[in-house]
Image: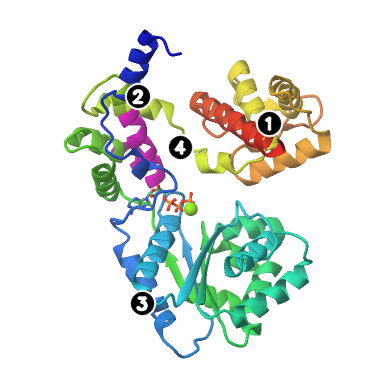
């Protein structure tokens, strides 16, 4: 039974006043209904895909959205998808969004798409070729048109090469009735350099390039997001300006929104009814612009453990770089702590490579002054405290889900 003072404490916790009206509106998965400074681009998409609603068969349509981190690529595509779904009363088309960082292989992507068309298809058990012809048959039977959004396609291509892109485009050509249209999202157009000239030029001509946000853009974005997330007049104009100023160095709206979220949390922690610039400063000190929380969530358990190990070692030694051997011995300790069997050397190397590809860590070969050549590991800009906590929580959650699934 709960003791009455425990009950009072619990009550005071859940009834604690808060500046947040709807904190979910600041989460990474939330798509806001209004995107300041992306209105033009939304219209370009609408004009380009308006044929989706026309009866006659249209040739394959594909468009590429590029721009730096936090410039709103994913959000733009998702918002466009929502708008299409809202006006598509007759269910003329199906939008499928796939993030290639999560669905890391062509097989997973094709099977996810096939399963969107027919839920009865098992996730495994087909060869890639079988899956491809199954998808073509499904598309021929399927009446709505398909708009496939492939986010972070540059990441997939850096892993598996360009063949998959041709396979995808060919699938569209092999169906007799149904076309798939595509929105490809990437940081820049570098990934098309390995493609043949005609495919390259088709990518270049249908291309929306987003710039990083300016300070005034960010101010409008922060304002519109705080109206959704905070109670009226709980954030001062100064605080909004300070967040815009801090995040304008990178022009990254994600960073701006993370600080906004953190500043609200700080105000709540201090039981302040208003978010002041001081809360923004505290939030800034805790939030790390380089490592993206979504990226951490997509890592496997052992990739998280090795990252945790690197962070701890960097923190402990206070050096900018640590050697791979140090990282590995620290990883073994982390495995012990979480009661996990450490992976072998070659596996660890492949985790390190993967983390480096995802820009979570950076590596370089040691120069003069060290015995032999060794790979040195660093984390860009180490204000590692919050990342460590976030990682630990994420590892614990992952272990819980695994244990739950095994029961
Ligand atoms: N114009 C905008 N209005 C409101 N919120 C925005 C706007 N642009 C971006 N955001 C928010 O900023 C964050 C980052 O945007 P988004 O994920 O779309 O960036 P991205 O370009 O896909 O970045 P990355 O290259 O890292 O994937 C999201 O939380 C998104 O909701
Ligand atoms: Mg994105």
Name the residue tied to disc 4: 289
Name the dominant secondary structure of the magenta segment: helix
- Asked if residue 249 is among those painted magenta in the image, a careful observer would answer yes
Q: Earlier in the sequence, mark 3 or mark 1?
A: 3
1 relative to 217, above or below: above
Mark 2–mark 1 CB contact (< 8 Å): no
Give the number of the disc on residue 107. Answer: none
User: Looking at mark 1, is its residue's CB closer than 8 Å to ligand 1?
Assistant: no
For disc 3, the marked residue is: 47
Asked if the residue at label 3 sits under 8 Å from ligand 1, the reply is no
**In terms of image quadrants, where is residue 51?**
bottom left
Query: Residue at left 56%, top 59%?
Result: 98
| Residue that sits furthest to the front in the current view | 1
Q: Do we see residue 321 in this rendering?
A: no
Image: magenta residue range: 245-265
Q: Position of residue 269 (x, y in %)?
A: 33, 21
Q: Secondary structure at mark 4?
A: loop
Q: Secondary structure at mark 2?
A: helix
Residue identifier under label 1: 306
User: How far apart, in angstroms, are the residues tagged by discs 3 and 1?
Assistant: 46 Å
Q: Which residue is mark 2?
A: 282
Which of pointers 2 and 1 lies earlier in the amino acid sequence? Answer: 2
Q: Residue at x 30, y 47 (%)?
A: 218
In the image, is 223 to the left or to the right of 142? left
Say which label, 4 or 3, has the lower sequence index. 3
């Amino acid at each position: 039974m709960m003791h009455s003072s425990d009950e009072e404490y619990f009550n005071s916790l859940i009834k604690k006043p808060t500046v947040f009206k709807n904190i979910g509106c600041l989460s990474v998965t939330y798509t806001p209904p209004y995107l300041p400074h992306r209105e033009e681009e939304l219209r370009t998409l609408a004009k380009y895909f308006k044929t989706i609603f026309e009866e006659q068969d249209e040739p394959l349509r594909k468009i590429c959205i590029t721009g730096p981190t936090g410039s709103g690529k994913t959000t733009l595509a998702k918002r466009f998808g929502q708008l299409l779904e809202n006006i598509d009363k007759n269910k003329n088309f199906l939008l499928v969004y796939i993030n290639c960082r999560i669905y890391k292989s062509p097989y997973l992507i094709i099977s996810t798409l096939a399963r969107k068309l027919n839920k009865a298809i098992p996730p495994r058990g087909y060869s890639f070729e079988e899956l491809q012809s199954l998808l073509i048959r499904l598309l021929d039977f399927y009446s709505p048109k398909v708009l496939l959004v492939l986010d972070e396609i540059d990441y997939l291509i850096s892993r598996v090469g360009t063949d998959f892109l041709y396979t995808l485009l060919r699938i569209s050509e092999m169906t007799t009735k149904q076309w798939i249209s595509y929105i490809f999202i990437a940081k820049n157009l570098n990934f098309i350099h390995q493609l043949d000239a005609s495919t390259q030029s088709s990518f270049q001509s249908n291309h929306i390039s987003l710039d990083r946000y300016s300070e005034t853009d960010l101010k409008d974005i922060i304002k519109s997001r705080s109206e959704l997330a905070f109670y009226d007049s709980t954030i001062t104009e100064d605080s909004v300006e300070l967040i815009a100023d801090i995040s304008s160095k990178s022009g990254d709206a994600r960073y701006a929104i993370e600080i906004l979220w953190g500043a609200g949390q700080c105000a709540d922690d201090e039981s302040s009814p208003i978010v002041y610039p001081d809360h923004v400063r505290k939030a800034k000190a805790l939030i790390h612009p380089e490592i993206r929380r979504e990226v951490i969530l997509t890592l496997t358990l052992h990739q998280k453990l090795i990252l945790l190990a690197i962070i701890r070692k960097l923190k402990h030694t206070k050096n900018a770089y640590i050697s791979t051997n140090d990282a590995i011995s620290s990883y073994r300790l982390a495995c012990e702590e979480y009661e996990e069997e450490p992976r072998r050397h070659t596996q660890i190397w492949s985790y390190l490579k993967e983390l480096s590809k995802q820009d979570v860590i950076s590596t370089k070969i040691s120069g003069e002054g060290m015995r032999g050549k060794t790979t040195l590991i660093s984390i860009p800009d180490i204000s590692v405290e919050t990342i460590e906590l976030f990682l630990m929580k994420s590892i614990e959650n992952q272990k819980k889900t695994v244990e739950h699934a095994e029961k």
